Image: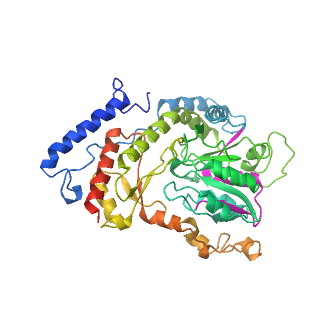
Amino acid sequence: MKHNPPASPSHVSRREFITATSAALLAAGATTAKSAGASKLAINGGDKAVKVTVKRARRWGDLERERLNAMLEQNSLFYWKGPQTALALERFKKIYPFKYAHTCASGTAAIHIAVAATGVGPGDEVITSPITDIGTVIGVIYQQGVPVFADLGASTYNLDPADVERRITPKTKAIIAVHLCGNPCDMDALKAIADKHKLVLIEDACQAWGAKYRGQPIGAVGHIACWSLQDSKHITTGDGGMVASNDERFGPMLQKFGDKGGDRVKGGGFQSFATNYRMNELSAAFLAAQLERLEGIASKRAELGNLLTEKITGIPGIRPHQVHPEDRCVYWFYFMRFNTEAFRCNRAELVKALQAEGVSCSGGYINVPLHREPVFQNHGFFAGHWPVREMGLTKMDFTKHHTPEVEAILQNGIRFIIHEGMTEEYILGAAEAVRKAAKHYAV
Ligand SMILES: *Cc1c(COP(=O)(O)O)cnc(C)c1O
């Protein structure tokens, strides 16, 4: 089965295709503008800006079937020395050149393993982003550490290095850099801060399969990197995760902290305490196949998201998703902000208008920053208690935690779905929808 077919006919180059498509759209605009259908919003009875319907391509097929069939010939489905796990790790390391990599049950598990390997203990602080999946901090709290939420870049939605540095205290042990939407964080700045303050830098690359930082596969700058294989991620095993490191201090610990605390290489009984986060051979077989699809998926998403940026840049009141020109963002979703003061409508109205144009979008991402979720506000992580606070090991009060840019991002951000089944024609239509709506609602 051939997957990720190019959107443009193979005999036409990408540039020619875009030019031709743009020309066709311009021509269509020129004729329909006379009939007033093109500038009138679809929500008010005008023509839709998006003329195509996009279908999510099937995400698996013969590659996975072949691996699952091979797996069925085995008499054990256990990961250790399992051939499917070995193949998945081999293929992973071909893309991500890590010395140590360990398959596990989820992205949450991967990060918990990383945090445990780092040696985060009672009262130790870990600085991270408050706009992320809660899985980023579950492991921190289970290790009795204290998540400290920093503010984010206004259009990158990633850790603001200056704010990270401001929040460092003598108790800070690690930074977890979340590559939100698959957009690489400013890793050079974060690594410099980590080195200066002797902190461990963990990369949460759960949304960043296939992303690149300054041309290198994501995960290479920090000490430990983590991925999720949950169903919504670019490649998946339904649920699953990967944790990897090149650091001799942490790499050898990954297997141990993912597998009940025992070291399967060295033996020696249970010298450390951990939970069971193992991935079995069924998932590993699937993963080995999914990794073959990664580059096609990642490059397509990057191309589509970058095209959207190109086409909405310069529209008054609109802030495109900011990506460093040397990086590859894989747009787990595309996050655009709009200047509420420049518009006569609120976000819900703008989203409704864009949806009526045929755009797949919605307001915001998570409802509130993580620290404003009830479990944080109540400091009630363990049966209503938070032992480290009750023991005086931290004074953290999440009701007083403040990240102003984060609040603003969640209030005026609009999330566009990007996926590898979309076409350039769809993106051009979506950009046209933004342009139409921005013009219509301009104050
Ligand atoms: C999905 C995700 C996680 C958690 O991964 P699971 O596999 O769902 O446990 C953590 N961090 C980020 C940024 C994610 O998107």
Which quadrant of the structure image shows residue 135? bottom right
Residue 306, position in %: x, y? 43, 43
Left or right for 120, reference 158: right
Foreground pick, 14 / 241: 14
Left or right for 382, reference 263: left
Foreground pick, 381 / 400: 400
Confirm whether residue 29 shows in the render: yes
Q: Residue at x 39, y 44 (%)?
A: 310
Foreground pick, 9 / 82: 9
Residue 162, position in %: x, y? 62, 60
Q: Is residue 118 magenta?
A: yes
Q: Farthest top residue?
A: 11
Q: Is residue 325 magenta?
A: no
**Quadrant (top left/top right/bottom left/bottom right) for the C terminus:** bottom left
Residue 167, position in %: x, y? 67, 65
Q: Farthest left residue?
A: 35
Q: Which residues are magenta?
A: 100-129
**Quadrant (top left/top right/bottom left/bottom right) for the N terminus:** top left
Q: Residue at x 82, y 53 (%)?
A: 272
Q: Residue at x 63, y 31 (%)?
A: 94
Foreground pick, 417 / 142: 417
Residue 87, position in %: x, y? 64, 31
